[in-house]
Each structure stands twice: as structure tokens, then as C-alpha cells.
Amino acid sequence: MTDPTERLPTRRNTELVLILFASLVVVAAEGVVEGTRNGHLSSHLATYGAVPLVVGLVAHLMIRRFAAYADPFLLPAVVLLNGLGLVMIHRLDLGLAQQAREGIGDYAGAAAPSQVIWTAVGLVVFLAIILLVRDHRMLQRYAYTLALAGLFFLVLPSVLPARYSEVNNARIWILVGGISIQPGELAKILLTIFASSYLVSKRDVLSLAGRRFLGVDLPRGRDFGPLLVAWLICIGVLVEGHDLGTSVLFFGLFVVLLYVATERISWVILGVVFFAGGSYVAYRLFSSVQIRVTVWLHAFSYTQTIGYQVSQSLFGLGTGGLFGTGLGAGHPELVPLPSTDFILSSFGEELGLFGLVALLMIYVLFIARGFAAALAVRDSFGKLLATGLSFLIGLQLFVVAAGISRLLPETGLTTPFLSYGGSSLISNYALLALLIRISDSARRPTTSRPPLKPLSEEHAAVV
């Protein structure tokens, strides 16, 4: 028990210094891009340099007031990633515009201004969660309601007509008035909350062993339900929406949460078996999966057709070498969708292997601090939720990095905080807010934390 007379350091000043440093790095990167591409600095330097600074300072003030003991490294890491992503999107806008002037390809307009707007919306969502969710444990009360909402968002695009939901043969969007929304991004957060709550309540039952096979204690047959349901949901998403990335992400998340909750390796083994079986069935049934596997195995045999995107990504990474061509000096715009699915390859070409590894280390720091919050928080629900949210970022990053380097088939997932896209950015800012709240609960002295009423004393019913 913490001594009530002892004052723990909040480390908010450390967070502020790191935010200022991250903003300085972004300003320097934008200055290099403009100097290389245009030969002079423009007003964009002030605009895109101010975005991470304003976002960081506003979020910092909210954390200082309402989550004073939160981890000081989470927000600066996001400010740096979001800022560098904005710089690269602006750099790609310049390259694509030049290509259009030379009569190569089409240019739909600058994406960086839209990313600024989505960043502002993400910040608003972050502030709202910090302000409204004063204790992460309150989310456990609404677990089933959030699960229904998550499943609704996950299934909605697949039941809409194709003209309102399909982009690049994937029915994962909602297209309204020129705005595209990917509701599956929010569904991942909601379903992570539900899975954490469910596994906390069923942990003892799921930990019981059934039969022993090849030296491994398998779970009881009656307990396969959660894993089977998760598998069926992922297969359903793949069948209806052709969304391989979300299927992989959600199933991997649930298997890991099962393992963390029960500490039984048998769940991981069963998860691998289910995943292998589902992958084989998907390959046999769906042409989109067959194309991705073919490109993965034989990318350089189809450099002008289905393998063009992946092969150009590999050429770009090879061109970058160890130290890169320099920001603004390469040609990452030659890769289709360079600011979304393949933004990591854009960084790899212009920053080189060393720069790309440095960028990935920022993610490693963010994920490590999320796992640290999971270890330090006192309640089981918070431990599972922080683990799941941190693992989401880690798995998504791994799948994206493996896709652009041809270690795995490309799945169409975006890079968290870096890639262009409103849905992804908003959901990731919501994820950040939840990790901030959990880390604050973990470090806050117990005497200063208000007790949470048990469910039996609440008047509201759980749906």
C-alpha cells in the first residue's frame, strides 16, 4: 500500500519535453522535404510543423489535469509518428503532383490537408475518452453492449450494396458523400474490450484441462466455444468483405488474449491449427486470397500486372539501401497507394534501413510501454485490455512490415498513426486514450483512486 504522505512523481514535465523534441524532429523533416523538392521553404512548414505541436500540447494539458500519473512516453511517441506520417504524406503529394504534370498517372488532389483534419478529429475523440472514461473498469459493465456495436460495425459494410462499400474489391468501407469510413477500425477496439471482459469472467473455466495429447493438456471440448466463434466471425468477414487483414488481426488478438488469460499454451496450439485450416479453406475458395499468395511467392514474375505494387516496394527498399536517398530525393510515389498500405516502404526508400529501423523502434517503445501498463495495473480486466490494445498495434505493424518486404502476403492493413486515413487515425487515438487511462490507474497511488462500485450495486442493466 502506498504511503498517503508520499508524493509520487507524475513525470508530466518529461512528457512535455519529449513532445517538444518530437515536434522539432517533425519540423526538421518537413524542412528537408521542402528544401529538396522546392529549393525553398514555404508556409507548409509552419502548417505541418504546428500540427504535432498543437496536438501534443492540447493532449498534454488534458492528461496533466485528468490523468496525471499516466505513462509519459505514450503520447510523445504518437506525436512523433503522426507528425512524420503527415510529412511523408505531404512529400508524396508533391511527387504525385509532379508525376501528373509529366503525364504519368492520375492525381486526385493533396491528401495532407485531409490528414490534418482527421488528426484534429482524432484529438477530439482522445480528449472525449480521457474526460468521460475516468476509470477504465467502467467499460467492463458495458462489455456485451460494446460487443454488439462492434459486430454491427464489422458486418455493416458487407450487407450494404457494393457501390456504398466496395473499394479495390474489398467491402470494408462506408462510402457517403465522397467520404469513406472504415467501421472495422472502431470494431477492433470495441471487440477487444468485450474479449477482455469475457475472458476475465470465464478465465477459471477456460483454464481447466481436458485430455492430454502429445504431452499437451488440451482444453475441454465444451470450452472451445469462444475460439470457434472468433474463428467463424473472421471467416465470415473474409467471405463477405474480402478483408484478409482484419480477419488475421482479430483472430490473432483473441488467441493471444486467451493465452494471457489462461496461461495455457494449448490455446495457442489450437489457434494455430484453426488459423492454418482457415487459411487453406480461404485459399481454395477465394480468388483474392489466391492472387495475394501468388504475388507473395512470385512477385517478380508479375512485375507489370498483379505483382507491380509489391515489386515496386521491394525495388524502393533496395534503392534506399542502408542510409536512404534522403527525404524528398527518392521516388516512393511510383508504388501504388504509397501513403496508405505502403507508407513504410516510402520511409524505407528515403530513410534507408537505419531510418526505417529507428521508426520501428518508436513503435517498439510504444508497445513496450503499453505492456508495462498491463503488468503494473492492479485489476485483471485492465491487464487484459492493455495487453490486447498493445498487441493490436504490434501485430498490425508486423503484418504491414512483413507485407511490404514479402515476408508474408500483403493484407491491405495500414500502418498505425503513419498512414493516411481517417478511420484508422481516429481509432488509434481512441486506443491511445485507453492506454493512457490504464497507465494512469497503474501508477496512481491507491489512496487517490476512487473505488468503483461492484456491478451488483449498479442500477443500470447490462445489455
Image: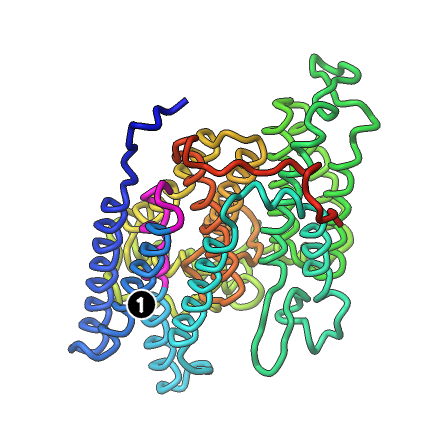
Q: Position of residue 449 (x, y in %)?
A: 45, 37
Q: Main secondary structure of the magenta part?
A: helix
232 or 286, which is in the foreground? 232
Q: Any magenta on residue 68?
A: yes
Quadrant of residue 382 within the rendered picture: top right
Q: Could you tell me which quadrant the N terminus lies in?
A: top left
Mark 1 falls on what kind of element? helix
* Span highlighted in magenta in the image: 66-85
Up/down of 275 relative to 270, above or below? below
Instruction: Identify the residue shown where x is 54% and y is 46%.
Output: 408
Q: Residue furthest left?
A: 40
Disc 1 target residue: 51
| Amino acid bearing label 1 | Val
Up/down of 276 relative to 414, above or below? above
Instruction: Identify the residue shown where x is 72% and y is 14%.
Output: 214
Q: Position of residue 21 (x, y in %)?
A: 21, 53
89 or 436, which is in the foreground? 436
Q: Any magenta on residue 337?
A: no
Q: Position of residue 80 (x, y in %)?
A: 31, 55
Up/down of 272 relative to 140, above or below? above
Q: Is residue 447 left or right of residue 245?
A: left
Q: Is residue 211 left or right of residue 244?
A: right
